[in-house]
Image (cartoon, grey):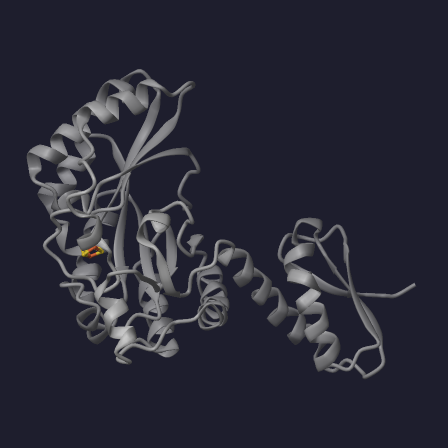
């Protein structure tokens, strides 16, 4: 089952007041500066929509960790818009340890269809080092409750957190797959200004997860999820998600991160396909048209790397009538 695609209307719940201490979070800097989203804001946002069938998403915080009255007020504000068809459903993101049966009953009754859990890692040592305040067992328990409650389950993971290794991140991916989510979001760790992570990094106690580290790791994660039939619905932080306010000082931030990863995945595929190519050959790779730029790489980087590695006289790409993810060596004419 894949999560139905709907036009999502995101409303970001401010982090202010969160009692947790995640090292990568910039909540200290923004707390007190961001007004809470109110029922009136919800009403104003939804009234301005034209058309039907939207999905309202409460993102950016731990929805079910808000005081119950606040949750109810935000959920209630959406009800008239569910009744008149402007909204087809709601979704929320939250922490695994903020999920219990009563929270799910409340969400279900209010028309929430999708619950996103910030798992981040399934390695307890990494969760501890990241100050997450929950363990992998919380994620397993919450995921089961969400799925058993009939919700779509989306899991979020981070790569390159303090204490993580490529192997522990790959293991996290395998353990998330075992929870049978309807989709995952992968967020490589970004160092934001004025966060505990920035201090750890500056004092030499954290090695930065570079864009290159994250691209090469995510190019291994993607095929794992793909083989398991789990859609990766986001790769890298959305450039609009508060980054301009937070100020990126390091880490794996790139506005086109997803494209970089897909391009690397194609490079690896082409590398396997060209295994055994003879030096001096002139070769042409065929791929469906909308994958040409990913296979070619930025500034022909993939083709140049392959030409050098296999000592080819030339390598080019043509768009052909092939299934989406297929790649073939074409007969040169
Ligand atoms: S990332 Fe951590 S500290 Fe920041 S709002 Fe979420 S739970 Fe709280």
Residue 329 visible to an observer of this rendering: yes
Q: Residue furthest top?
A: 84
Q: Residue furthest right?
A: 333
Q: Position of residue 151 (x, y in %)?
A: 27, 42
Q: Position of residue 216 (x, y in %)?
A: 50, 71
Say left or right for 259 vs 82.
Answer: right
Ligand 1 found in image quarter: bottom left
Count of number-bearing discs: 0
- Residue at (72% x, 72% y) in the render: 304
- Residue at (24% x, 18% y) in the render: 80
Give the quadrant of residue 187: bottom left
Choose between 269 and 130: the one closer to the eye. 130
Say left or right for 169 vs 13.
Answer: right
Give the quadrant of residue 252: bottom left
| Residue 22 drawn above or below residue 57 | below
Say left or right for 289 vs 83.
Answer: right
Residue 122 visible to an observer of this rendering: no
Choose between 161 and 147: the one closer to the eye. 161
Identify the image quadrant of the C terminus: bottom right
| Residue 225 drawn above or below residue 160 | above
Q: Position of residue 103 (x, y in %)?
A: 12, 42
Say left or right for 103 vs 292.
Answer: left
| Residue 205 drawn above or below residue 156 | below
Give the quadrant of residue 45: top left
């Amino acid at each position: 089952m894949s999560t139905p695609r709907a036009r999502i209307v995101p409303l970001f719940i401010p982090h202010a007041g969160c009692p947790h201490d995640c090292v990568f979070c910039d909540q200290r800097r923004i707390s007190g500066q961001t007004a809470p989203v109110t029922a009136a804001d919800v009403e104003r946002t939804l009234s301005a929509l034209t058309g039907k069938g939207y999905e309202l998403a409460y993102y950016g915080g731990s929805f079910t960790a808000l005081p119950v009255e606040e949750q109810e007020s935000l959920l209630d504000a959406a009800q008239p818009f569910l009744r008149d068809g402007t909204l087809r459903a709601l979704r929320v993101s939250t922490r695994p340890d903020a999920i219990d049966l009563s929270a799910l009953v409340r969400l279900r009754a209010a028309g929430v269809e999708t619950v996103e859990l910030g798992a981040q890692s399934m390695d307890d040592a990494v969760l501890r080092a990241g100050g997450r305040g929950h363990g992998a067992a919380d994620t397993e328990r919450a995921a089961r409750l969400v799925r058993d409650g009939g919700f779509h389950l989306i899991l979020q993971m981070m790569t390159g957190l303090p204490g993580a290794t490529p192997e522990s991140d790959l293991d996290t991916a395998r353990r998330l797959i075992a929870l049978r989510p309807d989709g995952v979001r992968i967020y490589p760790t970004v160092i934001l200004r004025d966060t505990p992570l920035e201090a750890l990094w500056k004092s030499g106690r954290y090695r930065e997860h570079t864009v290159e580290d994250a691209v090469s790791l995510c190019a291994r994660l993607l095929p794992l999820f793909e083989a398991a039939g789990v859609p990766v619905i986001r790769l890298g932080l959305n450039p609009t998600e508060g980054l301009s306010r937070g100020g990126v000082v390091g880490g794996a931030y790139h506005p086109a991160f997803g494209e970089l990863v897909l391009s690397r995945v194609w490079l690896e595929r082409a590398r396997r396909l060209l295994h055994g190519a003879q030096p001096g050959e002139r070769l042409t790779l065929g791929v469906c048209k909308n994958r040409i730029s990913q296979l070619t790489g930025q500034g022909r980087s993939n083709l140049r790397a392959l030409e050098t590695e296999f000592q080819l006289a030339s390598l080019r790409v043509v768009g052909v009538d092939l299934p989406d993810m297929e790649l073939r060596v074409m007969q040169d004419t």
